[in-house]
Image (cartoon, helix red, strand yellow):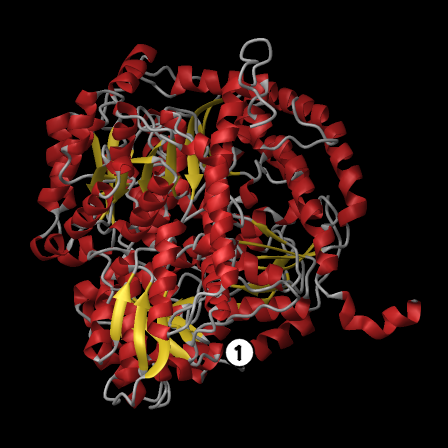
């Protein structure tokens, strides 16, 4: 589905000028670099898929005192990359809060016995007290690891997720990790993901990837027979079962998924990744680092794919199949053909209810671009999009997806986002929990596009019908018609009577 | 293909489909390298044993599934209870994202908080520049009447001096000289969210009271509710009771409107809360009552220091605790408790008498903040129930003593055990080795419910997996009815679930109870 529409560039440029005028001078200057309107692609010939350009400054510090929606490096490492690896214990090393607030808040679905051989929806913390700050926490950390070994003997490894004080007081968690790994003959991974590092959760992803490279790969003799169609799925955290809806499809076209990173993943799946023949990466932002490393060191190529909505699913499946040759390509065409009637049925059902509806997005990772075509598959239009923690290459890739005139906002502040929403009055906003309720108070339908509002999966064909259903139930909900009390319009009520 | 366009199968039914079952089984078998089934089931059984319990309770360093959060969360919640107040957390910004999400997920409401967004350079040079720029931006963009500053552990470890920084920021014109910027140091490695609440409320009071002389004490009573996930229902219910009594009172810190704004097309960044004028006037009140002692220890001392009489309760729930609250208020205000309230009381007693047989002798495990656990144990004993395990991760030895005194006051507390400083993984062992009929606490208890089969009554904070509970009061006699009903519903639902297998357990699946 390639929907043809343009957005109102002039109106959006004026909106940007209006919100910037409300900032103090210094902050206005800093924020102005993060806001722009997508322009048409000057070099369309180079890449036929590119339809516009959206250049903004990104991956730089947030302005203090304004409400940024960003998280921190710890959130990127523990919350996103490491946390879902299910058979390891991930210690939130430092004070109690970070582990508590990230406890069971991402829906990384898994199957396993929690507390016995699986530990994702638990909060392990060294619960730093004042004396640990003063005297250092390494001794306590050693004891924490010993106690884990005793009480959770079936855990297959431990990661140490550093909170802010660890780096500030200079604890040597690497030394603790080495010592305890030897003593307990297990994997212990120190991760220097203190929250003050970097400007958002993004650096946490990078640090987490580096820790996999340095502390997991090539550490064991693996008993594993690789096959010709072995792939790793990288950067799918299995929110609401996304990775399962993707895996079932990849298996259907004849591939063998040897590792699911990191939703429903085990340490074994991560360890064996260097034996696969291809890395399929969904969340480029969080996992491109390790994919590049595996390419350099092990010669494993990597490929981005997008399993949101049938247009991208088909394109991605064909692209993946091409890598493996005719046998897989044939199977893939059959699979695509098999799902076509299902896709048509979904689109036929929802298009009349959703076409022409305008959507604004503000999310993290890959979704500010990847979900765009899924909306367009249903006839919906994207008026604005942006990343919490995107980098320049994310915005370059976004150009492949957005139409001319689309409002682009990087590290948008809640103030800007609210003003944009108020003036544009889109039919739907897709963002996170912190944005959900202000938007709904304004009478505008909303979907949480980090957690799918506890619905899902959204990936793959099985996910597409849930995605379509969810957008319909948000937008066409009767509640939006009840916001105005009828007596506000008493004169006309009397007239009707 | 299990999915269809006509009826989209959500995650729960979708993953029960045979295709997915098979896929997951094969994934496990071929790629996960699981431990042998026997080893897993042996370990599972072992974790239910007394031997495991001993090891588990002997833990000294590791904390697993604690029932407490960190100080700044309490400070942010406290600030939300003052008129047009923006919370400004000095430190790295990720913390603020967590506090906002946590509060939003519980209340299903917006939570507006800003950060000074400190990064590595601030770790080296200090966060003064972030404070100067940050306060200027907050003041200009969000039009607050007050900015309440608290700290994260990062700012505390590097030793940023809030008072000095705020003075500096004022000198540089970030906010006008006379603009109110109360502050509280709230290191995450000291105490818990209840202490953060205490520090912030005290910080606000000091900001307005310091250096001001008390004029002659008026008869007004200050009421400090404490950190309360049910503030929406509770504060409104208490105001209704106090209005019925025609008492002259003032809530210091009231987040009930802030966390319950209407949907009518406008987003209100600020709503309700104690006004600055009221906070100023509150200095002259005769009395300050705290509804939660452990949330307000420093604040209460401060109130006494300025010359007020002060007393506190432990989250007053149920009959006798509500009686006490009303009698104290009656005594210090000189107002009678009206007949209407006596009738409400009688209706709660009536309900308790009607349901007594279902509650008598039931055993409970209660966990949460110290004041709540105290209150709940007291109410359970009023219903003839036995609080068997009373656990507060942020409970102190003083709390333990108070609990023991309470439990000793009733024959129903005879077999109770008090667990200060323990976490929910410890409670898991307690529930396996010394089981109870019902578990009372926040949403995190659902894993205990699954593991041990103990039905969970969701109360307090956070409640993420049920909607709107916090809109109904727990305090007062009406709140007592709500509590009673919540417990009874759980008991009846559970009995039905255990006896609803047709042809097998038809007995006890009764219509009339």
Residue B208 visible in the picture: yes
Chain identity of mark 1:
A
| Quarter occupied by residue B458 | top left
Identify which residue, A24 or B389, lies in the foreground. Answer: B389
Q: Residues within 10 Å of mark 1 (few under 14, many from 20)?
A: some
Residue B473 visible in the picture: no
Q: Position of residue A96 (x, y in %)?
A: 26, 50
Say which residue appears at 37% left-offset and 26% top-offset: B451
Q: Position of residue A401 (x, y in %)?
A: 62, 52
Q: Position of residue A252 (x, y in %)?
A: 59, 21
Identify which residue, A70 or B269, lies in the foreground. Answer: B269
Quarter holding the N terminus of chain B is top right
Q: Is residue B440 left or right of residue B394?
A: right
* Above-or-below relation of B290 to A224: below
Quarter holding the C terminus of chain B is top right
Q: Secondary structure at mark 1?
A: helix
Q: Position of residue B239 (x, y in %)?
A: 47, 67
Say which residue appears at 45% left-offset and 68% top-offset: B242
Pointer 1 residue? A20
Count of labels shown?
1
| Quarter occupied by residue A465 | top right
């Amino acid at each position: 589905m390639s929907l043809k529409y343009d957005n109102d560039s002039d109106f959006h440029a004026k909106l940007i000028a209006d919100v910037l005028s409300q900032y103090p001078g210094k902050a206005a200057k800093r924020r102005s670099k993060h806001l722009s309107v997508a322009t048409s692609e000057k070099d369309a010939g180079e890449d036929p898929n590119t339809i516009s350009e959206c250049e903004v400054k990104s991956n730089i510090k947030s302005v203090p005192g304004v409400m940024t929606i960003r998280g921190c490096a710890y959130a990127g490492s523990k919350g996103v990359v490491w946390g879902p690896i299910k058979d390891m214990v991930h210690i939130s090393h430092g004070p109690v809060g970070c582990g508590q607030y990230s406890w069971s808040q991402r829906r990384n679905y898994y199957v396993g016995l929690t507390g016995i051989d699986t530990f994702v929806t638990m909060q392990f913390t060294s619960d730093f007290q004042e004396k640990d700050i003063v005297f250092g926490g390494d001794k306590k950390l050693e004891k924490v690891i010993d106690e884990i070994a005793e009480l959770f003997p079936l855990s297959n490894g431990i990661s140490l997720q550093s909170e802010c004080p660890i780096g500030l007081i200079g604890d040597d968690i690497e030394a603790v990790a080495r010592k305890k790994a030897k003593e307990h003959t297990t994997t212990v991974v120190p991760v220097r993901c203190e929250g003050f590092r970097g400007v958002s959760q993004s650096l946490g992803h990078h640090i987490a990837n580096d820790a996999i490279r340095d502390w997991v790969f090539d550490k064991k003799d693996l008993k594993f027979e690789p096959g010709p169609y072995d792939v790793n799925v990288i950067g799918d955290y299995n929110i609401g079962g996304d990775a399962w809806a993707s895996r079932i499809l990849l298996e259907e076209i004849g591939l063998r998924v040897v590792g699911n990173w990191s939703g429903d993943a085990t340490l074994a799946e991560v360890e064996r990744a260097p034996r696969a023949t291809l890395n399929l990466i969904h969340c480029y932002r969080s996992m491109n680092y390790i994919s590049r490393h595996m390419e350099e060191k092990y010669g494993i190529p990597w490929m981005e794919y997008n399993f949101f909505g049938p247009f991208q699913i088909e394109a991605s499946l064909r692209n993946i199949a091409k890598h493996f040759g005719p046998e897989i390509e044939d199977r893939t065409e059959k699979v695509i053909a098999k799902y076509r009637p299902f896709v048509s049925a979904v689109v036929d059902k929802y298009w009349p209810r959703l076409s022409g509806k305008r959507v604004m997005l503000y999310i993290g990772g890959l979704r500010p671009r990847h979900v765009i075509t899924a909306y367009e598959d249903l006839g919906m239009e994207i008026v604005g999009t942006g990343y919490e923690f995107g980098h320049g290459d994310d915005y370059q890739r976004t150009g492949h997806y957005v139409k001319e005139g689309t409002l682009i906002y990087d590290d948008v502040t809640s103030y800007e986002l609210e003003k944009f929403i108020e003036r544009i009055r889109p039919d739907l906003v897709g963002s996170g929990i912190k944005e959900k309720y202000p938007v709904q108070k304004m009478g505008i339908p909303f979907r949480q596009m980090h957690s799918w509002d506890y619905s899902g999966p959204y990936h793959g064909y099985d996910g597409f019908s849930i995605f379509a259903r969810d957008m319909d139930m948000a937008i066409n909900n009767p509640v939006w018609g009840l916001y105005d009390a009828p007596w506000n319009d008493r004169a006309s009520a009397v007239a009707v009577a | 293909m299990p999915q269809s366009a006509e009826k989209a199968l959500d995650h729960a039914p979708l993953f029960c489909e045979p295709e997915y079952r098979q896929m997951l089984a094969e994934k496990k078998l071929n790629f996960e390298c699981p431990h042998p089934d026997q080893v897993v089931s042996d370990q599972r059984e072992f974790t239910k044993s007394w031997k495991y319990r001993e090891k588990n309770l002997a833990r000294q360093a590791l904390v697993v599934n604690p029932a407490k959060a960190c100080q700044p969360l309490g400070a942010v919640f406290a600030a939300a209870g003052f008129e047009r107040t923006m919370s400004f957390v000095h430190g790295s910004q990720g913390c603020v994202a967590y506090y906002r999400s946590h509060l939003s997920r519980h209340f299903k409401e917006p939570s507006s908080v800003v950060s000074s967004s400190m990064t590595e350079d601030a770790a080296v040079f200090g966060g003064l520049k972030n404070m100067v720029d940050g306060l200027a931006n907050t003041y200009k963009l969000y039009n607050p009447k007050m900015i309440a500053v608290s700290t994260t552990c990062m700012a505390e470890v590097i030793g940023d001096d809030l008072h000095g920084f705020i003075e500096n920021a004022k000198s540089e014109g970030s906010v006008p000289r006379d603009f109110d910027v109360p502050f509280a140091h709230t290191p995450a490695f000291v105490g818990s969210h209840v202490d953060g609440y205490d520090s912030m409320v005290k910080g606000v009071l000091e900001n307005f009271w310091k250096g001001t002389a008390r004029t002659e004490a008026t008869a007004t009573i200050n009421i400090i509710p404490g950190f309360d996930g049910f503030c929406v229902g509770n504060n409104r219910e208490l105001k209704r009771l106090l209005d019925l009594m025609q008492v002259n009172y003032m809530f210091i810190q009231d987040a009930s409107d802030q966390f319950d704004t209407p949907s009518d097309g406008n987003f209100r960044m600020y709503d309700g809360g104690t006004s600055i004028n009221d906070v100023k006037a509150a200095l002259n009140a005769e009395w300050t009552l705290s509804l939660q002692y452990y949330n307000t220890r420093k604040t209460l001392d401060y109130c006494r220091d300025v010359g007020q009489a002060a007393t506190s309760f432990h989250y007053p729930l149920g009959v006798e605790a509500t009686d006490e609250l009303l009698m104290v208020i009656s005594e210090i205000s000189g107002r009678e408790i009206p007949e209407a309230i006596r009738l409400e009381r009688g209706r709660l007693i009536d309900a308790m008498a009607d349901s007594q047989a279902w509650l008598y002798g039931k055993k409970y495990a209660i966990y949460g903040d110290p004041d709540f656990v105290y209150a709940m144990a007291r109410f359970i004993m009023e219903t003839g129930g036995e609080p068997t395990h009373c656990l507060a991760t942020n409970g102190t030895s003083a709390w333990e003593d108070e609990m023991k005194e309470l439990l000793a006051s009733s024959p129903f507390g005879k077999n109770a055990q008090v667990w200060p400083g323990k976490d929910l993984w410890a409670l898991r062992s307690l529930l396996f080795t010394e089981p109870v009929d019902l578990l009372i606490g926040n949403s995190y208890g659902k894993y205990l419910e699954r593991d041990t089969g103990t039905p969970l009554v969701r109360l307090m904070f956070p409640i993420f997996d049920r909607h709107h509970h916090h809109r109904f009061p727990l305090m007062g006699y009406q709140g007592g009815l709500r509590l009673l009903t919540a417990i009874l519903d759980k008991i009846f639902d559970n009995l039905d679930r255990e006896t609803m297998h047709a042809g097998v357990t038809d007995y006890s699946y009764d219509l009339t109870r």
